[in-house]
Image (cartoon, rainbow, N blue to C red):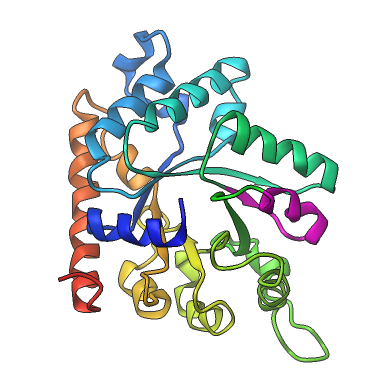
Protein backbone atom coordinates (compact mmCIF):
# COMPACT_ATOMS: atom_id res chain seq x y z
CA UNK A 1 0.00 0.00 0.00
CA UNK A 2 1.49 3.36 -1.04
CA UNK A 3 1.26 6.60 0.91
CA UNK A 4 -1.39 7.90 -1.49
CA UNK A 5 -3.29 4.60 -1.19
CA UNK A 6 -3.31 5.07 2.57
CA UNK A 7 -4.58 8.63 2.26
CA UNK A 8 -7.33 7.52 -0.12
CA UNK A 9 -8.30 4.79 2.35
CA UNK A 10 -8.61 7.45 5.05
CA UNK A 11 -10.85 9.48 2.75
CA UNK A 12 -12.92 6.42 1.83
CA UNK A 13 -13.46 5.30 5.44
CA UNK A 14 -13.67 8.89 6.71
CA UNK A 15 -11.46 7.68 9.51
CA UNK A 16 -7.83 7.28 10.57
CA UNK A 17 -8.59 4.77 13.30
CA UNK A 18 -6.51 1.67 13.97
CA UNK A 19 -7.70 -1.09 16.27
CA UNK A 20 -5.05 -2.88 18.27
CA UNK A 21 -5.77 -6.60 18.40
CA UNK A 22 -4.19 -7.04 21.83
CA UNK A 23 -6.21 -10.21 22.26
CA UNK A 24 -5.31 -11.39 25.74
CA UNK A 25 -6.68 -14.90 26.24
CA UNK A 26 -7.30 -14.13 29.94
CA UNK A 27 -9.56 -11.20 29.06
CA UNK A 28 -11.72 -12.78 26.36
CA UNK A 29 -15.46 -13.21 26.95
CA UNK A 30 -15.96 -16.51 28.74
CA UNK A 31 -18.28 -18.01 26.13
CA UNK A 32 -15.50 -17.84 23.51
CA UNK A 33 -13.25 -20.15 25.51
CA UNK A 34 -15.35 -23.05 24.25
CA UNK A 35 -14.22 -22.28 20.67
CA UNK A 36 -11.52 -24.30 18.94
CA UNK A 37 -9.43 -21.13 18.62
CA UNK A 38 -10.77 -18.51 21.07
CA UNK A 39 -8.28 -15.79 20.09
CA UNK A 40 -9.02 -16.06 16.38
CA UNK A 41 -12.77 -16.25 17.00
CA UNK A 42 -12.55 -13.09 19.11
CA UNK A 43 -10.51 -11.32 16.43
CA UNK A 44 -12.85 -12.48 13.68
CA UNK A 45 -15.90 -11.04 15.39
CA UNK A 46 -14.14 -7.76 16.19
CA UNK A 47 -12.95 -7.44 12.58
CA UNK A 48 -16.35 -8.25 11.07
CA UNK A 49 -18.01 -5.71 13.36
CA UNK A 50 -15.58 -2.82 12.86
CA UNK A 51 -13.83 -3.06 9.47
CA UNK A 52 -16.00 -0.40 7.84
CA UNK A 53 -14.99 2.13 10.52
CA UNK A 54 -11.23 1.64 10.62
CA UNK A 55 -8.28 1.85 8.26
CA UNK A 56 -5.91 -0.50 10.11
CA UNK A 57 -5.53 -3.36 12.53
CA UNK A 58 -2.46 -3.83 14.71
CA UNK A 59 -1.92 -7.19 16.40
CA UNK A 60 0.58 -6.90 19.24
CA UNK A 61 2.82 -9.93 18.80
CA UNK A 62 3.33 -10.50 22.53
CA UNK A 63 -0.27 -11.62 22.96
CA UNK A 64 0.23 -14.31 20.33
CA UNK A 65 3.81 -15.40 21.00
CA UNK A 66 2.97 -15.92 24.68
CA UNK A 67 0.63 -18.75 23.63
CA UNK A 68 3.30 -20.69 21.73
CA UNK A 69 2.42 -22.42 18.48
CA UNK A 70 -1.32 -22.00 19.05
CA UNK A 71 -0.88 -18.24 19.33
CA UNK A 72 1.15 -18.11 16.13
CA UNK A 73 -1.58 -20.07 14.35
CA UNK A 74 -4.18 -17.61 15.64
CA UNK A 75 -2.09 -14.75 14.27
CA UNK A 76 -1.68 -16.40 10.87
CA UNK A 77 -5.43 -17.01 10.61
CA UNK A 78 -6.18 -13.44 11.69
CA UNK A 79 -3.93 -11.89 9.03
CA UNK A 80 -5.28 -14.23 6.35
CA UNK A 81 -8.81 -13.27 7.37
CA UNK A 82 -8.03 -9.56 7.13
CA UNK A 83 -7.03 -9.93 3.46
CA UNK A 84 -10.68 -9.87 2.39
CA UNK A 85 -11.09 -6.32 3.73
CA UNK A 86 -9.65 -3.01 2.59
CA UNK A 87 -7.42 -2.34 5.60
CA UNK A 88 -3.77 -1.69 6.47
CA UNK A 89 -2.12 -4.33 8.67
CA UNK A 90 0.59 -3.58 11.23
CA UNK A 91 2.71 -6.15 13.05
CA UNK A 92 3.39 -4.54 16.41
CA UNK A 93 6.56 -6.55 16.87
CA UNK A 94 9.10 -3.90 17.97
CA UNK A 95 11.94 -5.85 16.40
CA UNK A 96 15.50 -4.58 16.10
CA UNK A 97 18.66 -6.64 15.76
CA UNK A 98 21.83 -6.99 13.69
CA UNK A 99 21.35 -6.99 9.93
CA UNK A 100 21.21 -10.70 9.16
CA UNK A 101 18.71 -11.28 11.98
CA UNK A 102 16.61 -8.31 10.88
CA UNK A 103 16.53 -9.81 7.39
CA UNK A 104 14.85 -12.91 8.82
CA UNK A 105 12.39 -10.83 10.83
CA UNK A 106 11.53 -8.92 7.65
CA UNK A 107 11.02 -12.19 5.81
CA UNK A 108 8.72 -13.47 8.57
CA UNK A 109 6.47 -10.42 8.66
CA UNK A 110 6.50 -9.34 5.02
CA UNK A 111 6.94 -12.59 3.06
CA UNK A 112 5.38 -15.20 5.30
CA UNK A 113 2.63 -13.25 7.07
CA UNK A 114 2.29 -10.50 4.45
CA UNK A 115 1.78 -7.62 6.87
CA UNK A 116 1.80 -4.14 5.36
CA UNK A 117 3.99 -2.73 8.13
CA UNK A 118 6.07 -3.70 11.15
CA UNK A 119 7.23 -1.70 14.16
CA UNK A 120 11.00 -1.60 14.60
CA UNK A 121 13.29 -0.24 17.31
CA UNK A 122 15.90 2.00 15.62
CA UNK A 123 18.47 2.18 18.41
CA UNK A 124 20.90 -0.33 16.85
CA UNK A 125 21.21 1.89 13.79
CA UNK A 126 20.69 1.70 10.05
CA UNK A 127 21.93 -1.86 9.49
CA UNK A 128 19.21 -3.17 11.83
CA UNK A 129 16.51 -1.29 9.89
CA UNK A 130 17.62 -1.42 6.26
CA UNK A 131 16.58 -5.07 5.66
CA UNK A 132 12.97 -4.08 6.27
CA UNK A 133 13.28 -1.19 3.80
CA UNK A 134 14.20 -3.51 0.93
CA UNK A 135 10.55 -4.54 0.47
CA UNK A 136 8.44 -2.61 -2.03
CA UNK A 137 5.12 -1.17 -0.82
CA UNK A 138 5.88 -2.25 2.75
CA UNK A 139 6.36 0.06 5.71
CA UNK A 140 8.77 0.31 8.61
CA UNK A 141 7.35 2.05 11.68
CA UNK A 142 10.19 3.28 13.88
CA UNK A 143 9.78 3.87 17.60
CA UNK A 144 10.38 7.55 18.22
CA UNK A 145 8.54 8.86 21.29
CA UNK A 146 6.55 6.25 23.17
CA UNK A 147 3.70 6.69 25.63
CA UNK A 148 5.05 4.60 28.53
CA UNK A 149 6.44 6.11 31.73
CA UNK A 150 9.90 4.73 31.00
CA UNK A 151 10.14 6.94 27.91
CA UNK A 152 11.66 9.56 30.18
CA UNK A 153 14.59 7.25 31.00
CA UNK A 154 16.26 7.72 27.60
CA UNK A 155 14.09 9.30 24.92
CA UNK A 156 14.09 12.78 26.48
CA UNK A 157 17.76 12.89 27.50
CA UNK A 158 19.29 15.98 25.89
CA UNK A 159 22.38 16.07 23.72
CA UNK A 160 24.94 18.22 25.55
CA UNK A 161 26.19 19.71 22.27
CA UNK A 162 22.89 20.98 20.83
CA UNK A 163 20.34 20.44 23.64
CA UNK A 164 18.16 18.24 21.40
CA UNK A 165 16.34 15.38 23.14
CA UNK A 166 17.38 11.90 22.01
CA UNK A 167 14.10 11.21 20.21
CA UNK A 168 14.70 14.24 17.96
CA UNK A 169 18.19 12.97 17.15
CA UNK A 170 16.66 9.60 16.22
CA UNK A 171 14.08 11.28 13.98
CA UNK A 172 16.64 13.47 12.24
CA UNK A 173 19.04 10.59 11.58
CA UNK A 174 16.55 7.89 10.63
CA UNK A 175 14.59 10.05 8.18
CA UNK A 176 17.62 9.72 5.86
CA UNK A 177 17.37 5.91 5.86
CA UNK A 178 14.09 5.76 3.97
CA UNK A 179 11.44 8.26 2.98
CA UNK A 180 7.89 9.35 3.76
CA UNK A 181 6.82 6.61 1.33
CA UNK A 182 8.15 3.69 3.35
CA UNK A 183 8.78 4.84 6.93
CA UNK A 184 6.49 5.99 9.71
CA UNK A 185 7.09 6.83 13.37
CA UNK A 186 5.46 5.87 16.65
CA UNK A 187 4.59 8.90 18.76
CA UNK A 188 2.44 8.30 21.83
CA UNK A 189 -0.79 10.24 22.28
CA UNK A 190 0.14 11.00 25.88
CA UNK A 191 2.99 13.12 24.46
CA UNK A 192 0.66 14.93 22.03
CA UNK A 193 2.06 18.43 22.61
CA UNK A 194 5.44 17.16 21.41
CA UNK A 195 3.95 16.29 18.04
CA UNK A 196 4.56 19.91 17.08
CA UNK A 197 8.32 19.34 17.48
CA UNK A 198 8.08 15.99 15.71
CA UNK A 199 6.39 17.62 12.72
CA UNK A 200 9.23 20.13 12.37
CA UNK A 201 11.57 17.20 11.64
CA UNK A 202 9.24 14.81 9.75
CA UNK A 203 6.45 16.98 8.31
CA UNK A 204 5.31 14.52 5.64
CA UNK A 205 5.62 11.14 7.34
CA UNK A 206 2.72 9.17 8.71
CA UNK A 207 2.71 8.80 12.49
CA UNK A 208 1.30 5.81 14.36
CA UNK A 209 -0.18 7.22 17.54
CA UNK A 210 -1.10 4.81 20.35
CA UNK A 211 -2.48 5.87 23.70
CA UNK A 212 -5.99 7.05 22.81
CA UNK A 213 -8.72 5.75 25.10
CA UNK A 214 -7.65 3.61 28.03
CA UNK A 215 -4.24 5.31 28.24
CA UNK A 216 -5.83 8.76 28.39
CA UNK A 217 -4.49 10.41 25.23
CA UNK A 218 -6.51 13.23 23.65
CA UNK A 219 -7.58 12.79 20.03
CA UNK A 220 -8.16 16.54 19.69
CA UNK A 221 -4.61 17.28 20.84
CA UNK A 222 -3.15 14.68 18.51
CA UNK A 223 -4.95 16.23 15.55
CA UNK A 224 -4.09 19.78 16.61
CA UNK A 225 -0.36 19.11 16.62
CA UNK A 226 0.06 16.12 14.29
CA UNK A 227 -2.24 16.44 11.28
CA UNK A 228 -0.64 17.15 7.89
CA UNK A 229 -1.91 17.66 4.34
CA UNK A 230 -2.51 13.92 3.84
CA UNK A 231 -3.79 13.44 7.38
CA UNK A 232 -0.51 11.74 8.30
CA UNK A 233 -2.00 10.03 11.35
CA UNK A 234 -2.95 6.48 12.21
CA UNK A 235 -4.47 6.65 15.69
CA UNK A 236 -4.70 3.41 17.61
CA UNK A 237 -7.14 2.29 20.26
CA UNK A 238 -6.99 -1.20 21.72
CA UNK A 239 -8.55 -1.97 25.11
CA UNK A 240 -11.05 0.87 24.87
CA UNK A 241 -12.67 -0.87 21.90
CA UNK A 242 -11.98 -4.59 21.98
CA UNK A 243 -12.57 -5.02 25.73
CA UNK A 244 -15.37 -2.47 26.12
CA UNK A 245 -17.60 -5.43 26.97
CA UNK A 246 -16.98 -8.99 28.09
CA UNK A 247 -20.52 -10.13 27.40
CA UNK A 248 -21.85 -12.04 24.38
CA UNK A 249 -22.55 -8.73 22.61
CA UNK A 250 -18.89 -7.64 22.90
CA UNK A 251 -18.56 -7.13 19.13
CA UNK A 252 -21.64 -4.90 19.04
CA UNK A 253 -20.24 -2.75 21.87
CA UNK A 254 -16.88 -2.61 20.10
CA UNK A 255 -18.67 -1.29 17.01
CA UNK A 256 -20.27 1.46 19.08
CA UNK A 257 -16.93 2.51 20.57
CA UNK A 258 -15.22 2.45 17.18
CA UNK A 259 -18.04 4.45 15.60
CA UNK A 260 -17.73 7.13 18.29
CA UNK A 261 -14.07 7.63 17.41
CA UNK A 262 -14.70 7.42 13.67
CA UNK A 263 -17.34 10.16 13.88
CA UNK A 264 -14.94 12.38 15.81
CA UNK A 265 -12.27 11.77 13.20
CA UNK A 266 -14.65 12.43 10.34
CA UNK A 267 -15.61 15.78 11.86
CA UNK A 268 -11.95 16.72 12.28
CA UNK A 269 -11.09 15.75 8.71
CA UNK A 270 -13.94 17.88 7.41
CA UNK A 271 -12.91 20.79 9.62
CA UNK A 272 -9.39 20.64 8.20
CA UNK A 273 -10.73 20.38 4.63
CA UNK A 274 -9.41 16.88 4.02
CA UNK A 275 -12.98 15.71 3.42
CA UNK A 276 -16.06 17.37 1.99
Q: Residue at x 22, y 34 (%)?
A: 49
Percent position of residue 46, x then y: 30, 32
Task: Tell which of 101 and 123 is nearer to you.
Answer: 101
Task: Tell which of 215 and 146 is nearer to you.
Answer: 146
- The answer to whether 29 appears left or right of 123 in the picture is left
Q: Residue 228 falls in which quadrant of the image?
A: bottom left
- The answer to whether 237 appears left or right of 166 in the picture is left
Assess whether residue 119 is covered by the magenta stretch: yes
In the picture as drawn, the residue positioned furthest to the bottom comes out as 162
Task: Tell which of 253 and 30 is nearer to you.
Answer: 253
Percent position of residue 24, x then y: 47, 30
Q: Residue at x 80, y 47 (%)?
A: 97
Q: Residue 216 falls in which quadrant of the image?
A: bottom left
Query: Total number of numbered labels?
Result: 0
Quarter of the figure with the C terminus? bottom left
Residue 32 in sight in this render: yes
Q: Give the answer, above or below, for where 108 lies relative to 189.
A: above
Percent position of residue 115, x then y: 53, 39
Q: Residue 171 falls in which quadrant of the image?
A: bottom right
User: For the magenta stretch, what is the residue range?
Assistant: 118-134
Assess whether residue 184 is covered by the magenta stretch: no
Q: Residue at x 45, y 65 (%)?
A: 189
- The answer to whether 270 appears left or right of 210 in the picture is left
Q: Give the answer, above or below, for where 104 lies relative to 35.
A: below
Task: Tell which of 216 and 36 is nearer to you.
Answer: 36
Q: Residue at x 70, y 69 (%)?
A: 174
Q: Give the answer, above or below, for where 183 lies relative to 198.
A: above
In the picture as drawn, the residue positioned furthest to the left comes out as 276
Percent position of residue 123, x then y: 77, 60
Q: Give the answer, above or below, for where 273 lies relative to 211.
A: below
Residue 261 in sight in this render: no
Amino acid sequence: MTRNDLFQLIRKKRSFLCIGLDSDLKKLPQHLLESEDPVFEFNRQIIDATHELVIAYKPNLAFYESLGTQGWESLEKTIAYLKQYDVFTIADAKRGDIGNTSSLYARAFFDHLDFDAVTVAPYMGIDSVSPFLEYQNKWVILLALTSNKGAFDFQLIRNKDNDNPLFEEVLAKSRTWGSADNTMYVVGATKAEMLEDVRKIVPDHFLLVPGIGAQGGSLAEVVKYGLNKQCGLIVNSSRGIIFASHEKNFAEIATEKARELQKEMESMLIHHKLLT
